[in-house]
Structure formats: structure tokens, C-alpha cells
Image (tube, helix red, strand yellow):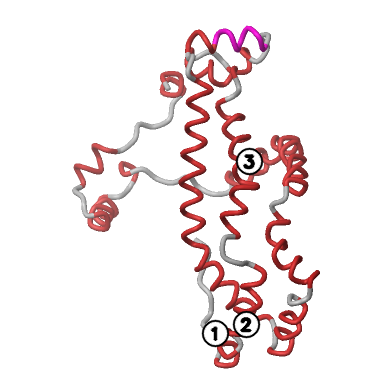
Amino acid sequence: MFGSAEPLSAEEGARLGAAMQVVTKLFPEGTYAKMMEETMSPMLDGMMGGLGGSPAIALSGLTGLDPFTLSEVDDEKLSAALALLDPAASERNAALGEAMFGLISEVVIEIEPSYRAGLARAYAVRFTEAELADLAAYFSTPVGEKYAAESFLIFADPQVMASMNEVMPAMMQRMPAMMEMMTTAGAEFPEGRSFSQLEAAERAQLAQLLGVSEDELAASEPAPATAENLQLQ
């Protein structure tokens, strides 16, 4: 997903030890755990509140009513209706958030050593031996040590993350133009074909490539999208 990196040259590999000394200052053990506790936990709480805490969205799932129509109903009435249908909603959302936080915490803490090793390789590539020595010397000073310990955490600071709230309104404002652009760009290319639209030789080739029979492919072919099918969905 993220591509692959070129192997280090002999010269870069020789700098790896010095780079790791710098990286250990910048990204000490436990950084991810601290970041999860200080930043990700409140963020996940907000996400779970946004996804499950909206009475209109929750009621739409329970009743099938249009969420935009429900959003016009008074919040107090929506909350009362949700309490009637799903009294355990808030407790469930809290449990889901806690479970999600625990799972993500386990993953990021597990990959921290690999991430630190990757940082060391990146520093070995981007900085010379002398520059790494200068960085190590700076990070040994009081202010340098403080900066090194806080540098990664600063990017996840609530003051920084809160500014990202401006992104969503900007994205929503551009959404109609974005959808129109995607439709226009996609219209320049032919749509994909279904199994029944292939020539006989192509059907046989597809079956061989996927390791299934032509009959299986024919039986599993999705129904074409029609207005009637969309209404049934």
C-alpha cells in the first residue's frame, strides 16, 4: 500500500547507528502510547459520538425514516424517541469506542519499533554524519531534549487537531463540484463489462484465471442496475 524503499547504500548504512541515536531522542519508547492517550482517545470519543450520538442518524437506522427529515424534528423529541427504541445506545457507543481504542492502541504500540527503525533509515539517508552529530548535540541540551520529546506529540496536539475542524466545511462546500468533476472524468472511459458481455473465448479465459467454472461465473453475475432494482434496495 505504501510502496517500498530502496536499500541503504553502504555510506547510508554506516550512518544508521548515529541516526538511531537521534531518532531515539525524537521518538522515544512509549511515544505512540502517550499519543494514543492524549490525542486519539478524545478523537475516538468524538468520532463515536458523531456516528452514534446523532439521534437523527440512529433513528433513521432503526425506523427507516429519512435522516434529513428527522433532523428537522426537535432534538429533545429525537432523544426521547431514541431512548424509547434503544435505551442502551449511549452505553453501547461507549463500549464500542473503548474496544476500538484498545484495538488501535495494541496495533500502534506493536508497530512502534518498526516505525522507529524506519525513521532511523530515513535520517541516515537525509542527513550526513556531521549533521547527525549536530542534531544529537542539540538534543542533548535542555531545550533540545524537550523539543525532541515533544516534537511528534505536537503534531497531534489538540490545538493542532482542532484546526482540522475547518477542513470538513471546506470539503462539504466543494463536494458538488467534486462529484461533478468525478462524473465528467469517469464518463470519458467505458464502463467495466460483466461476464455475459464477454466473448466466448474471454469467458473461458476469465474462468481459467479465477479458477472457477463458467457456470459459476454466470450464476454469480450481479443483476444489472435498474431503477426498479434501486427502489427495491
Mark 3 to mark 2: distance in Å? 33 Å
Q: Which residues are magenta?
A: 75-81
Locate the C terminus and report the quarter of the image it occupies. Answer: top left
Q: Disc 1, disc 2: CB below 8 Å?
A: yes
Query: Local crowd at mark 2 within 10 Å, few (<14), some, or many (≥20)?
Result: many
Q: Earlier in the sequence, mark 1 or mark 2?
A: 1
Q: Which residue is mark 2?
A: 124
What secondary structure is marked by label 1? loop
Q: Disc 3, disc 2: CB below 8 Å?
A: no
Q: What amino acid does circle 2 point to?
A: Ala
Q: Which residue is mark 1?
A: 8
Query: Local crowd at mark 1 within 10 Å, few (<14), some, or many (≥20)?
Result: some
Looking at the picture, how far across and down is residue 55, in whole percent?
59, 18
Observer-side mark, 1 or 2, equals 2
Looking at the picture, how far across and down is residue 43, in whole percent?
63, 41
Q: Which residue is mark 3?
A: 43
In the rendered image, the vertical position of residue 179 relative to residue 5, given as above or below: above
Q: Is residue 8 left or right of residue 126?
A: left
Looking at the picture, how far across and down is residue 11, in whole percent?
59, 92
